[in-house]
Amino acid sequence: MRAFITGVAGAALTDEERRFLRDAQPWGFIVFKRNVAGPTALRALIDDVRATVGRAAPVLVDQEGGRVQRLGPPHWPNYPPGAAYGALYDMDRDRGLAAARLGARLIAADLAALGIDVDCLPIADVPVAGADAVIGDRAYGNEPGKVAAIAGAIAQGLVDEGVLPVLKHIPGHGRATADSHLRLPVVRVDRETLEATDFAAFRALNDLPLAMTAHVVFSALDPVAPATTSAVIVRDVIRDSIGFAGLLMSDDISMGALSGSLAERADAAIAAGCDMVLHCNGQMPEMQAVAAAVPELSGQAARRAAAALSAKRTAAPIEHAATRAEFRALMADVWQPAEGTV
């Protein structure tokens, strides 16, 4: 088993992809919209991936609600953006947290029915005025205590339904003035400010089992390398100051923020202290380059991976129709779904 998570190109595996998965043995697999041709076909794809690698490999997805939702109508409901939970929290803290937990649990129920057992959620980024809109209404608020509280409720909702949460984008993407999908953001703020704001929300969530890095340069800490490839930030901030001890994966290394070949990017992320490299676009030459660059999963990284998977719980039974009705009622003052979607 190798220390990477991969995507594939379409809604069914090609023979080339099967050979690649069988030989490369990625730790996990990530689903995107391009892989979705309805519930039956997606479940078949997931089953095929696991049969090909010969184990129950983790299957991930970015299913946040709002703008970032890989599964949607007509087969799956729309869910609110993170900012809607923040708006409700401002009206009634307990109601906002209850809605966040229930919304995440409903998302997790959708995913679990397909065999997806990891959701790249919650977000603990704390946006500031003037930041790029890539986070925007995905965030729960602009105060770290509020963000951490809602993120914690969302993580709990996922866990309650048997789906593992991935905390993102550690140590913070909220202050970035560029979209890291396109180019490298540089944050020029002193460490004291970062510790009190950007890093604070993550510190309150440091017991979550998995986290995803930010492709962001924090010039006060490392003037050159983004968090994903900065040993200083992984060691001194993520592991030490924030205290995160779980499995640390990179954000997608094919994003425009990073430079160098795919092999160089993968090698740099592992060298910096990431346990796992994420590669999403399903392009076979890149997948092969990443697989060749990453190590076998071993040592501390393997122990963290095992510990993360051991955090998965069997879902406690709930009546999902009643839970959806409760969720709609909780959210009614801040968000109205399209008819028939939740």
Image (cartoon, helix red, strand yellow):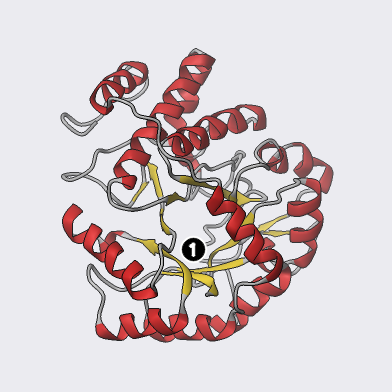
Q: Amino acid at mark 1?
A: His
Left or right: where 257 falls relative to 37 = right
Left or right: where 6 falls relative to 44 = right
In front: 331, or 256?
331
View extreme (top): residue: 92
Q: Residue at x 71, y 43 (%)?
A: 199
Crowd around label 1: few <14 · some 14–19 · many ≥20 (10 Å): some
**Above or below, comparing residue 268 to residue 289 in the picture:** above
In terms of image quadrants, where is residue 264?
bottom right
Q: Position of residue 259 (x, y in %)?
A: 60, 77
In front: 92, or 216?
92
**Above or below, comparing residue 71 to residue 282 in the picture:** above
Q: Which residue is mark 1?
A: 181
Left or right: where 164 falls relative to 281 = right
One can see residue 142 in this view: no
Q: Residue at x 51, y 33 (%)?
A: 156
**Above or below, comparing residue 124 to residue 183 in the picture:** above
One can see residue 203 in this view: yes
Disc 1 secondary structure class: loop
Q: Position of residue 174 (x, y in %)?
A: 60, 45
Looking at the rendering, in which quadrant would you find the C terminus? top left
In front: 95, or 256?
95
In front: 99, or 14?
14
Q: Position of residue 70 (x, y in %)?
A: 32, 52
Q: Position of residue 149 (x, y in %)?
A: 59, 28
- Give the number of marks: 1
